[in-house]
Amino acid sequence: MALRILKYKWSVLLTSGRFYAALIFIIFFLDIYIAPIRIFCRTVGEKISPFLYPCLITDNSLLLLLLLSFLFLIADVPFMDHSVKYIMIRSGKKAWLKGQMNYLLAVSIFFMVFIYAGSILLCLPYLQIMGGWGRIIGTLAQTNAGVSFSINIFPSYAMMLDYTPVEAVLITMAAGILVVYLFCLVLFWISLYFSRMVGMCIVTGEILIVTTAWRLGKWGIYVFPVTWMQLTTVTKNKVEDRPYIWFTWAVLLILIFFIRFMILMMSRHLEVVEAAEQE
């Protein structure tokens, strides 16, 4: 039954104007950062590899804009529309809660995959499949050549040494899915306990901290999971001033399972309150 609820929610999402508006926002923000790179490729006559994605996520300003676009997409949490009573009567409260949480996981995965796909499509026609990072990303990481082209993406050379391109993409995507899904669950949980406004304020505050975490000192990047999406913040080697990547993943998974458990525990006391208007 939880799977049916997931399918139903996904079909509703595909007919929502908010869904397509959020996708337009994401493409728009990505293109602002990628357009100068296309000009750079055309000028120097070089192709770019399909591994720009981890470099984009390490930019705090772009990551902030992308996460706010995602928050706009899920702004209708906890999904109390006029169909809730009917669905709960047929499926039960616990199945309804599981369906909503699975739906949020599916949306989180789609969000990160869409960003990666967008980063590839927006690099056309200067994209070339290659095994390494490529000369364009390497040049931007090791020189200031991008400044002349108003490129705001500064790839980390240390990241390029520590990770293969495929590793960087997969790790960034996995970490992004975990962090975004955690935000979804926190928003869902708080919205059920208190109100949607309280949940939105807390999650928005967590997202906004991405631009200032470094200024808070070492504890800032340990306390705020939003920074764990970036390979320039976490490390696969035990470095004193940065969180260990496996530690961050363990913490994220523990938090996710804990909040899921707490949400399911609410099924006994959950009251169905219809929204003022249809989703």
Image (cartoon, rainbow, N blue to C red):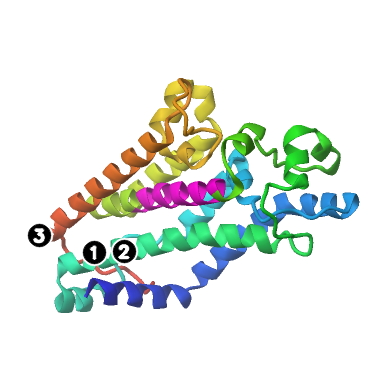
SS type, badge 2: helix
Residue 232 percent location from the top left of the image? 56, 34
Residue 50 percent location from the top left of the image? 66, 56
Task: Name the N-terminal-most of marks 3 and 2.
Answer: 2
The amino acid beneath tag 1 is: Lys
Residue in the image at 81% along x and 37% along y: 147
Task: Name the N-terminal-most of marks 3 and 1.
Answer: 1
Residue 268 has which mark? Answer: 3
- Quarter location, residue 11: bottom left
Distance in Å between CA atoms under marks 3 and 1: 14 Å
Where does label 2 land, which residue? 102
Residue 233 percent location from the top left of the image? 51, 33
Whether the residues at callouts 1 and 2 have beta carbons within 8 Å, the answer is: yes
Dot 1: within a 10 Å radius of its alpha carbon, few (fewer than 14), some, or many (20 or more) residues?
Answer: some
Residue at far left of view = 268
Where does label 1 land, which residue? 98
Between 131 and 100, the residue placed more toward the observer is 131
